[in-house]
Image (cartoon, rainbow, N blue to C red):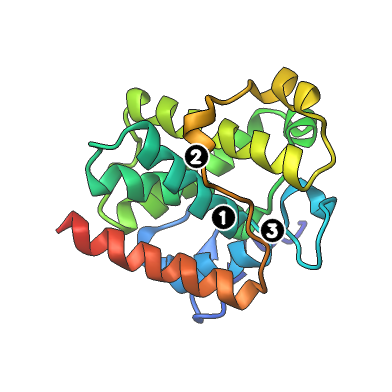
Amino acid sequence: MAKQPRAWQRMLSGRRLDLLDPTPMDIEIEDIAHGLAFVARWNGQTAGDYAYSVAEHSLLVETLFGRITPSAPAKWRLAALLHDAPEYVIGDMISPVKAAVGPDYKVLDERLEAAVHIRFGLPAKVPQTIKRQIKKADRISAWMEATQIAGFTEAEASKFFGKPDASMIDGLQIVLRPPVETRNAFTARHASLLEDCT
């Protein structure tokens, strides 16, 4: 009889996260922040001395979400910050790879997302209206990243992500910094939003 493959990952906090059956009890924000700060977007194919991390992207998406829906309560801004949280264990797969992997990736992603949400007091599934606004912020962020650090022309980026309204990105720049700084900024923003939720 074949031995069952290991389906859990040991985190720096000491938690063992079962990827097939994740529980909120095994999720810590420090693990998420650390993992996301070391996961590169665009498969690392970006200009600059530091990789553009998923943690940095998440901070930008939360800022953009706040511009799109300025009256949104803190819990939905927290959902925006955590929109890519599962990637702290499954990595950031570019869209073509996700398409090749198929529906199993989506199932794994949704299980992890539900556990993360419950851990921090959010509903397992975010309402579709909010999810659409987060996705809009995500696409604006992708356009900014594509044009500022990933070598896309504006026309090319607009074709894939849609051209954002200039007011949405006014004064915002892609930030590249050491992972430890991004990790600390992500953790601090999470703490601030969590406090605003109570």
Asked if labels 3 and 2 touch by Cβ distance under 8 angstroms, the answer is: no
Pointer 1 or 2: first along the chain? 1
- Say which amino acid is labelled 1: Leu
Residue at numbered disc 1: 19
Packing grade of label 3 (10 A; few <14, some 14-19, many >=20) is: few
Q: In this view, does 23 lie to the left or right of 47?
A: left
Res. 28 image quadrant: bottom left
> Residue 127: image x %, image y %?
31, 29
Q: Where does the image place residue 99, in percent across and percent down from the top left?
A: 74, 28
Give the residue displayed 41% in from the left and 38% down from the top. 65
Q: Tell me which amino acid carries mark 3.
A: Gln
Q: Write down the residue under mark 2.
A: 110
Q: In this view, does 70 lie above or below 171?
A: above
Whether residue 155 is situated above or below residue 61 in the rendered picture: above
Tag 1: Cα neighbours inside 10 Å, few (<14), some, or many (≥20)?
Answer: some
Gap in Å between the C-alphas at discs 3 and 1?
14 Å
Q: Which residue is depicted at the point 60% across and 77% down?
A: 180
Q: Mark 2 or mark 3: which comes first in sequence?
A: 3
Q: Can residue 83 be seen in this view?
A: no
Q: In this view, does 137 lie above or below 78?
A: above
Residues 85 and 177: in front is 177
Mark 3 residue element: loop
**Residue 151, visible in the rendered structure:** yes
Give whichever of 136, 83 is nearer the camera. Answer: 136
Residue for badge 3: 4
Sequence-earlier tag: 3 or 1: 3
Disc 1 vs disc 2: which is toward the camera? 2
**Of the residues tagged 2 and 3, which is closer to the observer?**
2
Residues at marks 2 and 3, CA–CA distance in whole angstroms: 23 Å
Kind of residue at badge 2? Glu
